[in-house]
Image (spheres, rainbow, N blue to C red):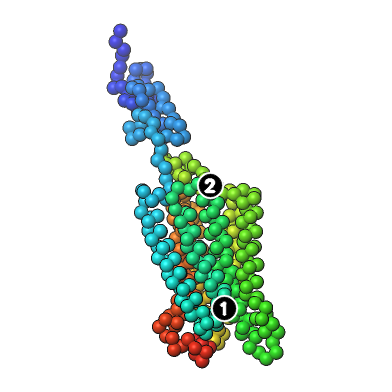
Amino acid sequence: MPKSRCNDRCPPGYRKIHNGGIFVCCYDCIPCSEGEMANVTDSESCFRCPDEEWPDDGKVRCVPKTYDYLSYETNVLPLMFSLTTLIFSSITILTLWIFIHYWDSPVVKANNRTVSIILLTSILLSLLCVFLFLGRPVDITCVLRQVSFGIFFSISLSCVLAKTVTVCIAFKATKPGSYWRKLIKIKISNSLVAICSCVQGLICVIWLSVSSPYQEYDMHSYPGVIIIQCNEGSVIGFYSVLGYMGFLAAVSFLLAFMVRTLPDSFNEAKYITFSMLVFCSVWIATMPVYLSSRGKNMVAVEIFAILTSSAGILGCIFFPKCYIMLFQPELNSRKNNCSRL
């Protein structure tokens, strides 16, 4: 028997909905909702795809979702970050070689050469940890990327803080019979670097003990995409690491800013002030973007902050000294050292 019909059949990808008329044979066709499909004609309802799949363009069948992360094969950003990291690392190694080559020169001696070498090494390691953020994340890289980033940057900031404290003590020690002369002899800068770095190491150990980072599949943030990312585990642990780094940077900036007007023989505080100003500005500007991003965009923002802040410390503190040692060697003498550095 022929069936009564007052409209065309609903094609696959659509479902029937009663239009409110008096005839049952009259209905409207509406497309399936997002994440649903219908593969038969005149479907009464649509069916939701599994979490790992997504409807095709016609919403006729479910297809596997695509994976999203900072992949070398599908994104140009990892190649750009890798090239930038290698360039900055090469500059850091060159600066390290210059300081070792001029190890006994007045410029190197006047700027606490041991702390300077530790600072350059930590900057190099901070730059190289960028490679842990690139590619498909797994559990081990999720742990290593944040821990190495936190520890290496804390060593760098501890060295900057030690340099700042050394400048303050050196100025105080110029007065005859000053008690501050004893602090110079006991190498307080080396102890400060060790203590501040160990505090960050302890924070990382507690963080990993409570809830360490791990690989996570985010299937719901973007339609048709599975974001492979790192879950930080303990949010308190992650922000404790960032907060401690911010504390070191803030203390270094405040101390260097207060002694920036010292005589020219101690004007390394000016370079430290600029370096910490760059560091704080970069992280303050990128944190809102970082918190509002997801997936590879979040990772890209963090990598940008690492590269920019590392380059800021390297350029502001070490470029003036390298310039004198390479292009104005006549100033690299005991006579002129006090008037320039």
Question: Distance of mark 1 from mark 2, alpha carbons?
Answer: 39 Å
Residue 180: % across, % down: 68, 83
Q: Nearer the viewer, residue 289 or 227?
A: 227
Crowd tier of the residue under label 1, counting other residues whose Cα lies within 10 Å: few below 14, some 14–19, many 20 or above: some
- Tell me the amino acid under the disc marked 2: Asp
Residue 276: % across, % down: 52, 71
Q: Secondary structure at mark 2?
A: helix
Q: Nearer the viewer, residue 318 or 108?
A: 108
Residue 117: % across, % down: 53, 72
Between discs 1 and 2, the one toward the N terminus: 1
User: For this view, does 171 lie left or right of residue 270?
Assistant: right
Q: Taking 19 as reference, is 222 above or below it?
A: below
- The residue shown at (50%, 72%) is 275
Spot the residue most to the top. Answer: 1
- State the residue position of label 2: 139
Crowd tier of the residue under label 2, counting other residues whose Cα lies within 10 Å: few below 14, some 14–19, many 20 or above: some
- The residue shown at (47%, 45%) is 228
Q: Taking 232 as reference, is 340 above or below it?
A: below
- Tell me the amino acid under the disc marked 1: Asn
- The residue shown at (36%, 48%) is 74
- The residue shown at (46%, 56%) is 131
Instruction: Specify the quadrant that holds the N terminus.
Output: top left
Q: Residue 112's mark?
A: 1
> Can residue 249 be seen by looking at this rendering?
no
